[in-house]
Image (cartoon, rainbow, N blue to C red):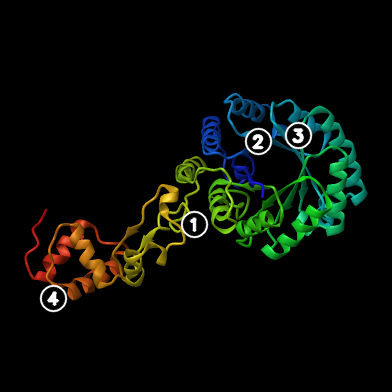
Amino acid sequence: MLKPIINDTTLRDGEQAAGVAFRLEEKCAIAASLSRAGVAELEIGIPAIGEDEIACIEAIVDLKLDASLMVWGRLTDGDLAAALRCRADIVHLSIPVSDIHLQHKLRQSRGWVLAQIARVVEKAAKSHSKISLGMEDASRADPSFLIEVARCAQRYGAQRVRFADTVGVLDPFKTFHAIVALRSAVDLEIEIHAHNDLGLATANTLAALGAGATHANTTVNGLGERAGNAALEEIVMGVRHLLGRDTGVDTRALLDISSLVERASGRTVSFNKSIVGRGVFTHESGIHTDGIAKHPTTYEGFDPAELGRQRSMILGKHSGSQSVRDAYDALGVRVAERLIPPLLARIRSFAMQHKQAPSARDLHRILAQARGTRVEAS
């Protein structure tokens, strides 16, 4: 089975998140980091925005990255002309395909869509070696019309179609069946572009890849419009552990890339964000910490070392006696067994009062209190 190709759109759709705007040096740093990590394709901008955007795209091109570079536009003569001014490897041109968009946004017919594809895609294919057609709102389009659109794109020279769940309304089962139908109808690369409005972007992307999609559109940290897009880090790890395939991306680079995009976007990654959140390998519950100590796989689905990370154990409301012993052992402090129950009670009380784990200094103070000794001021 072919290796799924990641097409990361952090610099295009990710930047379309409300209030996010990357500076040139940030875009170049993000692009370089993604390429070094082994991300095969990067969607880096929208030339039709104007001269500043084109200059930014060209600056990324000048980095001579290993990744193939894509630019995005609408399926219009003007956007095609702007895209052709850039030295991108792939030109992606998008057109709405659902009746909702055609009737209410464009006030055009299905016939107009097919005519536009025939004219603009053919023109694009004569001017550029790699053309991708974006099928906007494909998830709400008539399935038979969607196949007609894809066949038309193939007939006039496109090498790829992008199936866009533009408003994030699919589930993995519908996604799988939609991609299977598309896969059987055309001999094209198929890219899945999933939005996360119902929290299913990652699941839908993995379902699409399982059904025969060749490419996955992602963004770092799931950045993007509204609820965001399928997260790069989740897709890379999901493909590895659920599909048993490799994307070619160095998983040990994911945390640093996440931090880079977090700073550049101003969007804080949540503590419990899968894969890259600070808390995803942090254990408190006594049952869990005991299991982890006996064998890590009891409460971890994969080794944090795959991401260059380490697990940590913290003390809190749900800790058990063994966690208390281990914490004081780590401080080099011998604690009488009779003190373990009162120490545990004090630690639980501390966690509930302060909403955080006790520090080493806190633990020394709690121990002194449990022993009934005077705590020295410091």
CB under 8 Å between callouts 1 and 3?
A: no
Q: Secondary structure at mark 4?
A: helix
Q: Earlier in the sequence, mark 4 or mark 2?
A: 2
Q: Which residue is mark 2?
A: 45
Q: Earlier in the sequence, mark 4 or mark 1?
A: 1
Measured in 3D between alpha carbons, the distance from the residue under mark 2 to the one under mark 3, in whole angstroms, is 16 Å
Measured in 3D between alpha carbons, the distance from the residue under mark 4 to the one under mark 1, in whole angstroms, is 39 Å
Q: Which residue is mark 1?
A: 274
Label annotation for residue 17: none
Looking at numbered disc 4 in the image, what kind of residue is underneath it?
Arg
> Where 347 sits versus 222, above or below?
below
Circle 2: is it few (<14), some (14-19), or many (20+) Cα within 10 Å?
many
Foreground mark, 2 or 1?
1
Looking at numbered disc 3 in the image, what kind of residue is underneath it?
Lys
Label annotation for residue 338: 4
| Residue 271, visible in the rendered structure | yes
Foreground mark, 1 or 3?
3
Looking at numbered disc 2 in the image, what kind of residue is underneath it?
Gly
Label annotation for residue 130: 3
Q: Nearer the viewer, residue 238 or 22?
A: 238
> Where 89 sits versus 193, above or below?
above
Measured in 3D between alpha carbons, the distance from the residue under mark 4 to the one under mark 2, in whole angstroms, is 65 Å
Q: Position of residue 111 (x, y in %)?
A: 93, 49
CB under 8 Å between callouts 2 and 3?
A: no
What's the residue at 45%, 59% (across, down)? Answer: 272
What's the residue at 32%, 71% (across, down)? Answer: 286
Q: Earlier in the sequence, mark 1 or mark 3?
A: 3
